[in-house]
Amino acid sequence: MERCETVVTHDREGDNRSEFILQKIDHAVKPAARRVLFVAARFCFCAFILLTSVYCLLAYIPFTYQWVIRFNLVSWLPTFVKLHPYLYWVVFGMVAATLAPDLKRVSTKRLTAWFLLLHAAAGACLTVWPLLSKLENDGLSFIWSMVWLFPLLWLAAIDYVAKAEEIRWIEVAGHDRQTLLTAGLTSVFVATLYCGVFFGRSSGNADQLSQSTEQIIAIGWSLASHMFAFGILFAALKIINSISNSFPRGAKIEFLLCHFLAAGLCAVVIRKVVLPAIAFNNSLAVFFSMAAGLTIAVFIMGLTLRLNAPAEGPVSRGLAFALSPLTPPGLSKVSGVIIWGAIVVIFAWVAPSVVAMRDWDFLLQKLSAIAIWPISFAAIHRLASRRINRQYNLALVILVAGSMFGIYKFVDPARLKIPFNGAAVDISATLDRYSAYDVSFRVIREVSTQSPDDSLYEYLREYTNILPSTRVAPVQVNLVENLTRTEQNDRPNIFIFVVDSLRRDYLSPYNNAVSFTPNIERFARDSIVMENAFTRYGGTALSEPAIWAGAMLLHKQYVLPFYPMNSLQRLLDTDEYQSFISMDPILKELLRPSDSLVQLDQRPDNHNFDFCWSLKELEKRIDERQSSRPIFTYSQPWNIHTHVIAVEGRSVRDGEQFPGFWAPYASRVKHMDECFGEFVNYLKARGLYDNSVVIITSDHGDALGEEGRWGHSYWVYPEIMRIPMIVHLPPKLQSGLTWKASDVAFSTDITPSLYYLLGHKPIVANPLFGRPLFVATEQEHREYSRDSYVLASSYGAAYGVLTGNGRWLFVADGVKNKDHFFDLSEEGNGRLDHFTTANRLEQQQFIRDFIGSINEFYNLKEKPRTAGAFDMGRQARPADEE
């Protein structure tokens, strides 16, 4: 009996302990769950507001309005716009639930009630009048981008009033040694982290730094740069701590000033890293950066107060409190430190490679590195919290920081040469190659460096991406003085295939190492291979219109109606061609509707404009046509565009290998070659080939990992500006003509060449126009030859000068405020950053004068409104364009 009672007693005690444990878990889980829901609601609201603000900003910037919004480059954005009013109600409901307790507090009741009422009214207005779908490319869109930041500021104000006064702030504690140690260790940690990324990702890459001297210089410069950046941060924090010491509740002042410092740092990142990537560079960019930086920092401050305000005990360390949201848990244990370190290392390694092909001007990669900085600083600050503090003299700290700033800011790596084995190591080129993998170092370089004379760059930005509100009437581009129907009866068929992003070194006529384009090689044997071909614009947005115009254009998307400048379409109309055209988004803007125009690729998934599909449809259309008029075809397939390859998962057909080439790209080039070969056989079988002009070329090349670059962004680099151009002429047209395949040729020369071949001559010898590649006499050839040609990016203020019959390329990059010089000859060694000052000034002036000639030709009378100039006006569209 006693044994039974003892067992029952133990069972009851066990039940009581279990019940107690369950109650503890219940009490712990509920607050944790509420905390997670609170954070989720706030971040959903914040993400929605910021995305809306960014969308409005994208509508204001010409480049992003044209490509991101109108052409749906980001596939999910149209859905976001369509659902925007309903998503607003969802996130508003979520954040309203988090504000329910604030309606009961005396201090926040009125502020919260007005927030809910006004935002409910805003939701009703959005439901009736959806804002995003009505945005235009004008100044009103910029105003909306600023207005949409206000809800986050208001929400932060509620959080501050609700929590800041509940905290017992006391005098601020000194933390010089801890902060200095944190800054030093963070700089070493981040520099070492990306040094490891460099050695891991660059292994086997031809662009890696092969000499140990170059590697030591690059790594040392990166470490110095990181120490400079975090040294400046330490100096700023020291100043904040010294100011806070003057107040009895100094910890609160330090907490607030730390967030204002964060606002400034966010503004710098947005202004120097984010906005240049979307071609937003001038005065309004500064204004938006400051507003967005302040909004983000203040929102985080409010969230910090809500989630981390101590229930009891004073706060003496405002910096540590400000860093608390970024400080990972578990750092008090070795296992926690190891887990945190492993996560950071994996993120630094994986993030750049994952986003590289979808990136634009390294933006996502740089943001991934920037995200590591505060997280690392917060974690190391926590680990260094046990160090004995020591105060440093404020004046000495400012003096040292100022000296570091001055030395780093004004030392120009382009002027430094270090002798090694009888040759000088080009420091600037070395650092550029290294920064392709150390994106953290790239950010510091871009933020901290500045050209001593940026007047040219300001000029380039002023006349780049001109807003639609800058009214420019179309100008007649007359390649010949009088375009009339010729007496030539047997006009040739014309087939132009402009393969988007096709590199010439992936075609066997240009590269003997290529074995996967046998059909193009056979086509080249009875055609003319232009050995030195370039695009005038590094990007489709202006390159394709320039092909149709046969001339350089205003840097504007676009002067409408385009028909007066559309030399190629006017030629087709005059000579009565029946046209079969793949109407990509650009041509839908530029081509005038015509009964003789047949659209290709009209299928639901025509976004990719598949070359093989287009050719098969073209064959079917030709077989079915009833007209005897000559055929004109223009197609610009997107098969090998890096964005398309990324969407398709970098796939490679089974069993294919391409040593020395990027397989996903080469595989698609091989597939296109097969389809092109079948089409040439089709033309021969129908008796059309010998009476056809067939041109295979590209609108621009592409970067496939050179120095970490993917795509074409704002860059003017050799691999982007070089293009293939292979021209098949009917035998009857070749007789009596002369050409020089080794001379510089441009895609803008295609239309003037067709004019000449069809008997419309002489072509006007204007430096802004293309030239006929095939002429009757050597004298004509000399008349069209130029010593220098200006090239440009389609998207940003980057321009180049090509000289020496295509050997030398000078680049003035107004996006990065930096110049480059390239030797493009086979015996050359690529980039040469040690060009003379006189040469640099001469080429810069040539670019300035050439842009001035373009402005004068197109009657740009007023100072253009670019994405940095505020204007409320809209460009009036002609009646036939609306």
Image: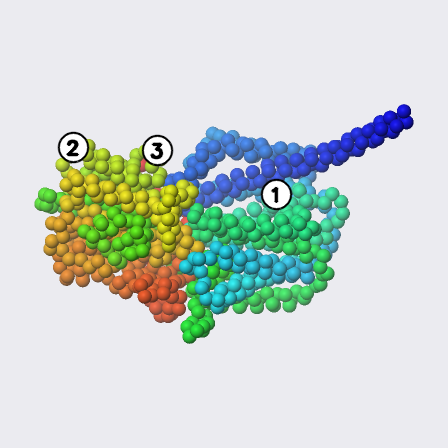
Which quadrant is home to the N terminus? top right
Which amino acid type is marked by label 3? Answer: Pro
The 10 Å Cα crowd at callout 1, few under 14, some 14 to 19, many 20 or more, is: many
Instruction: Name the colour scheme.
Output: rainbow
On residue 40, which mark appears?
Answer: none
Q: Which residue is mark 1?
A: 156
On residue 626, which mark appears?
Answer: 2
Which amino acid type is marked by label 2? Answer: Gln
Mark pair 3, 2: CA separation = 27 Å
Q: Residue furthest right?
A: 2
Q: Residue furthest bottom?
A: 422
Tell me if residue 113 comes above or below residue 562 in the rendering. above
Residue 503 rendering spot, x and y as whole percentages: 32, 52
Which quadrant is home to the C terminus? top left
Residue 124 rendering spot, x and y as whole percentages: 51, 30
Can see residue 306? Answer: yes
Tell me if residue 823 comes above or below residue 88 in the rendering. below
Tell me the SS state at disc 3: loop
Q: Which residue is mark 3?
A: 604
Q: Nearer the viewer, mark 1 or mark 2?
A: 2
Q: Nearer the viewer, mark 1 or mark 3?
A: 3
Mark pair 1, 3: CA separation = 45 Å
